[in-house]
Image (tube, coloured by chain):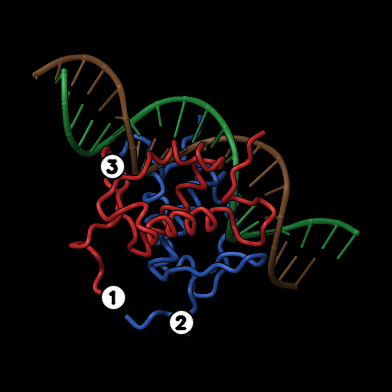
Chain colours: A red, B blue, C brown, D green
Amino acid sequence: MDDHPPVDPNAPKLIYVQVADHIAARIAAGELAPGARLRAERDLASEYGVAYDTIRRATALLRERGLIITIVGRGTFVTPEDQRPGS
Amino acid sequence: MDDHPPVDPNAPKLIYVQVADHIAARIAAGELAPGARLRAERDLASEYGVAYDTIRRATALLRERGLIITIVGRGTFVTPEDQRPGS
DNA sequence: TACCATTTGTCCGTATGTATG
DNA sequence: CCATACATACGGACAAATGGT
């Protein structure tokens, strides 16, 4: 079966951290621009081949880092420039 | 059937918040003294009649508030005086 | 107003991994 | 090695918020 490249269950790093890091890299690379909407969490889950719970942990991490913001009923967005935490 | 008094699924407050508040009240009342060990999370879950996940959310809340600390393999403890956050 | 699709949030139950003693 | 306890990961069900029809 297709495996999901960025996620390695046998790696020492936790899966949700692997996912968070991968998304963070996509943001850093500009592939996901400020203000851009990410795919729905459930879609990200199947995309990465992980459970919803795992995506929730990953996005929680990214929210803590200020990289994304999420609005219920709307979606998850790369933090726009005008809402970035000062430092 | 026995319901679990401090938890009301129909109340407007979220269940994990209800549980957290109830535990916080027990701490405030001195029923759970600083340094005291709480019951294991799985035991708390069946005690309160809620799922493990819900207890995890409740304890996460209490940890954020600095009311408890948890050590894997040991248990969950009311934050001792000497480890309380400054304010 | 009412309805509906989309999306995040909560809650449940289970299995496996890791740390402690 | 074993028992206890927290941590991560999985998957599913229902609720709540949002925006458009």
- Closer mark to the observer between disc 1 and disc 3: 1
Instruction: Report which quarter residue A83 is drawn in.
Output: bottom left
Q: Considering the image in quadrants, where does the C terminus of chain A appear?
A: bottom left
Where is residue A43 drawn, in percent x and y? Answer: 44, 36
Chain under label 1? A
* Residue A64 position within the rendered picture, expressed as x and y whole percent measured from the top left: 37, 62
Q: Indicate whether B55 appears above or below B86.
A: above
C14 up-or-down from B58: above or below: above
- The spot of residue B35 in percent (x, y) is 54, 75
Few, some or many C-alpha atoms within 10 Å of disc 2 (few <14, some 14-19, many ≥20)? few
Q: Which residue is mark 3?
A: A72
- The residue tagged 2 is B81
> Which structural element holds mark 3?
loop
The residue nearer to you, when weighing B20 against B3, is B20
Identify which residue is drawn at 49% across, 59% down. Answer: A21
Residue under disc 3 on the same chain as residue under disc 2: no
Q: Amino acid at mark 3?
A: Val
Which residue was labeled with disc 1? A87
